[in-house]
Image (cartoon, rainbow, N blue to C red):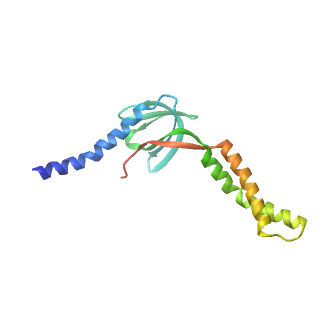
Amino acid sequence: MHKLMAVMLSLAAPLAAQDADWGRLRGLRPGEVIWIEYAKGDHIKHAKGEMRAWSEESLTFTTRKGETAIARADVRRVAVYGGKSHVKGAVIGAVIGILPGVLVGVGTVVAESGRSTAADVGGGVVGVMGIGAAIGAAVGRTKTVVAYQAPKK
């Protein structure tokens, strides 16, 4: 009898966790920016919009195209805007600056003396990476926080 109860409780735990995750969406404020992934027929759709309403059965949000209500069974993932990450933006900007930095380094050296050295190319890379990092840090990168993730089927 105790083993049967243990099995029943272990099967019920994931369902309770799923309900708790869906319940977290109740705390979203109307007008809050959300990213939602949902099923529409056989296709997975993505949308960005503003939270409108939450219920046990559905989630309603507004996009440029209008208001949409998605049934709970079709919602796969909901993420909430979490601000900007300037560090991530700086890293992305620096990585993007690598190739142009090499081209600037080689181009400068070839134009001046006809030869390029590793130090010359490295100087170009560092310079352009620094510019890319500064631009990326100023712009930032959008962070999202997952508010709901449907269980895998």
Given residues 91 and 27, the one toward you in this image is 91
Residue at 40%, 32% in the rendered image: 26
Q: Position of residue 54 (x, y in %)?
A: 41, 31
Q: Quadrant of residue 101?
A: bottom right
Position of residue 50 in the picture relative to residue 111 (left or right): left
Q: Position of residue 8 (x, y in %)?
A: 19, 48
- Report the number of numbered marks: 0
Position of residue 102 in the picture relative to residue 71 (left or right): right
Q: Position of residue 81 (x, y in %)?
A: 53, 38
Eyeballing the image, is 145 above or below 124?
A: above
Residue at 68%, 56% in the rendered image: 96
Given residues 100 and 70, the one toward you in this image is 100
Outermost residue on the top side: it is 30
Eyeballing the image, is 126 above or below 50?
A: below
Q: Position of residue 43 (x, y in %)?
A: 47, 50
Outermost residue on the left side: it is 1
Residue at 41%, 35% in the rendered image: 25
Outermost residue on the front side: it is 119
Given residues 108 and 5, the one toward you in this image is 108
